[in-house]
Image (spheres, rainbow, N blue to C red):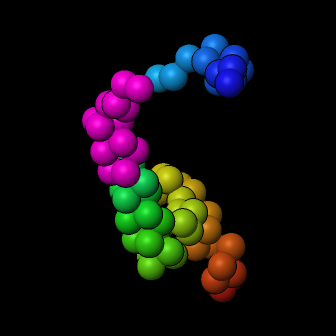
Amino acid sequence: MRPNDDLAKTTHDDAEPNPLWGRLALLMFGLTVLAFLTAIDRPEWFHLKPATGTAAAMVYASDHGSKS
């Protein structure tokens, strides 16, 4: 019986993958999930706020209207 030449010609990478890359990928996934869960619990982080005192005064004036 003749051996299968297609299987004989394929190269096999029998080297173990570096466990550091797997651990780093798992760590990054975990940190991403943690950041996501923390962010969805704090919607106030995503509200835009005036950056300067002048901008804050203009927002205050437009929200409350002028009384004079």
Front-lying residue, 61 or 1: 1
User: Is the residue 68 above or below the residue 46 in the image?
Assistant: below
Q: Quadrant of residue 62?
A: bottom right
Q: Residue furthest top?
A: 9
Q: Quadrant of the C terminus?
A: bottom right
Say whether residue 23 is left or right of residue 56.
left
Q: Residue at x 42, y 54 (%)?
A: 29
Q: Quadrant of residue 33?
A: bottom left
Q: Is residue 26 magenta?
A: yes
* Observer able to see residue 44: no
Residue 46, percent from left and from top: 54, 66
Q: Is residue 21 magenta?
A: yes
* Observer able to see residue 60: yes
Range drawn in magenta: 14-27
Front-lying residue, 50 or 11: 11
Front-lying residue, 17 or 25: 17
Say whether residue 46 is left or right of residue 33.
right
Number of marks drawn: 0
User: Is the residue 13 above or below the residue 21 in the image?
Assistant: above
User: Is the residue 9 above or below the residue 53 in the image?
Assistant: above
Q: Quadrant of the N terminus?
A: top right
